[in-house]
Amino acid sequence: MKLTRSPGLSYLWMGIAICIVAVLFTRWQWFINRGQQRLWWELVLVFLAADYLFLITPIQDHKSIRRLSIAGKLWAAIAWMCCIAYLVVITRGIKPVLANSSLIIQLSLLGLLLLVVLVISVYRLSHEWIRESLRSIMACAGGGFLVRFVTAPTGDSEVLAGLQAIPGATPLAAANEWSVPADPAAASALLQFAKRYEFDFIPTKTNHKEELLSDR
């Protein structure tokens, strides 16, 4: 089973991450005074690595899984590297040696450039989420409908009972797939079933992959 995270856990981590960042920045001078600047950087790098791994972990709810594409993971890596570089610029600017105005301007321009790259990376990252439905209904090319589960629905007896109550619904040899005929009674029951249990409708089986990739 692939490792996933719930939406609730995602919000919890966001709150924890904000607290960690606040503590690290407020204790910067404390680490400097004790000669432990290296430890501060190690803590920052460990946090950013953990945050990146958490970000690329797919999000799963009762209806779907959302994951980053390969391009999204690359944009996320660029964003995190910009954060590290930006921290280097900020900590460099704290040092009193920067009395030279030209060096201050150079660091300011570098910081502005990193900020622009960071904003672009986050924007691109937000458009690289792929949504995969855990349970869907698609129209078969030869007529009828195909009810598909990504994982076996054995743990949800209510959904199985509702599916079995549809006239003509039969399990297929393929794992976690059911066939429903296209007659009016079955189609009407299937529509009510889909609304009640929040199934996604996908036009045809051949377009299943394209539909998932386009729903970002």
Image (cartoon, rainbow, N blue to C red):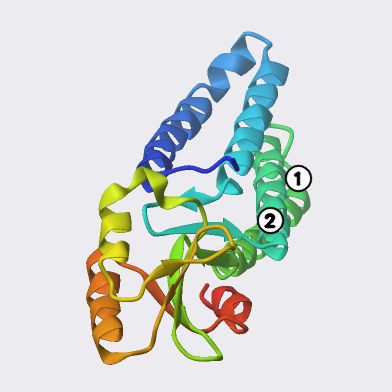
Residue type indicated by callout 1: Asn
Residue in the picture at 22% in, 75% down = 192
Q: Which residue is mark 2?
A: 73
- Quadrant assignment, res 78: bottom right
As drawn, is 187 to the left or to the right of 181? left
- Quadrant assignment, res 194: bottom left
Q: Is residue 39 visible?
A: yes
Mark 2 surroundings: few (<14), some (14-19) or many (≥20) residues within 10 A? some
Q: Is residue 77 above or below residue 124?
A: above
Q: Which mark is residue 61?
A: none
Between tags 1 and 2, which lies in front? 2
Q: Quadrant of the N terminus?
A: top right
Residue in the picture at 55% in, 80% down = 211
Q: Which residue is mark 1?
A: 100
Rendered location of residue 190, percent (x, y): 29, 77
Q: Is residue 95 above or below residue 87?
A: above
